Amino acid sequence: MTNAIAAFADNNGINLVLKFNSEPIDPKDPKSILEGVNREVMYQAGRDITDLIIGQVNGGQAAPATATRPTAGPNR
């Protein structure tokens, strides 16, 4: 099931899949609210936006995302 979810998400440009529960959240029931916001992550594409958010909070100067930083080549 996990592989099927990941393949479908990748093929359709979906970065995050949460487990769905058709039960409505009862805003008067703390347990219901917690269950609604703590849904299980079924798939996530590994996109880390931490540096972008920190940069925005710090005035727009974000560090490059870790995934786009080049790795050091061999010493010559």
Image: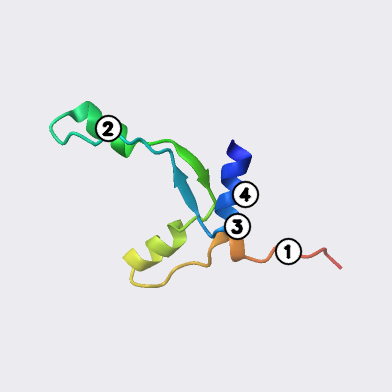
Q: Quadrant of residue 3?
A: top right
Q: Residue at x 59, y 55 (%)?
A: 10
Q: Quadrant of residue 29?
A: top left
Residue 24 pos. (x, y %)? 24, 36
The reply to whether discs 4 and 3 touch (Cβ–Cβ < 8 Å) is yes
Residue type of the residue flagged with mark 3 = Asn
* Mark closer to the chain start, 2 or 3: 3
* Mark closer to the chain start, 1 or 3: 3
Residue type of the residue flagged with mark 1 = Ala
Packing grade of label 4 (10 A; few <14, some 14-19, many >=20) is few
Q: Which residue is drawn at 43% across and 64% down?
A: 52
61 relative to 11, above or below: below
Closer to the eye: label 2 or 1: 2
Q: Residue at x 43, y 35 (%)?
A: 40
Q: Is 61 situated left or right of 30 in this image?
A: right
Residue 64 pos. (x, y %)? 53, 67
Task: From the image, tell me which residue sits under label 1.
Answer: 72
Task: From the image, tell me which residue sits under label 3.
Answer: 11
The reply to whether discs 1 and 3 touch (Cβ–Cβ < 8 Å) is no
Task: From the image, tell me which residue sits under label 2.
Answer: 34
Task: From the image, tell me which residue sits under label 4.
Answer: 7
* Mark closer to the chain start, 4 or 2: 4
Residue type of the residue flagged with mark 4 = Ala
Residue type of the residue flagged with mark 2 = Leu
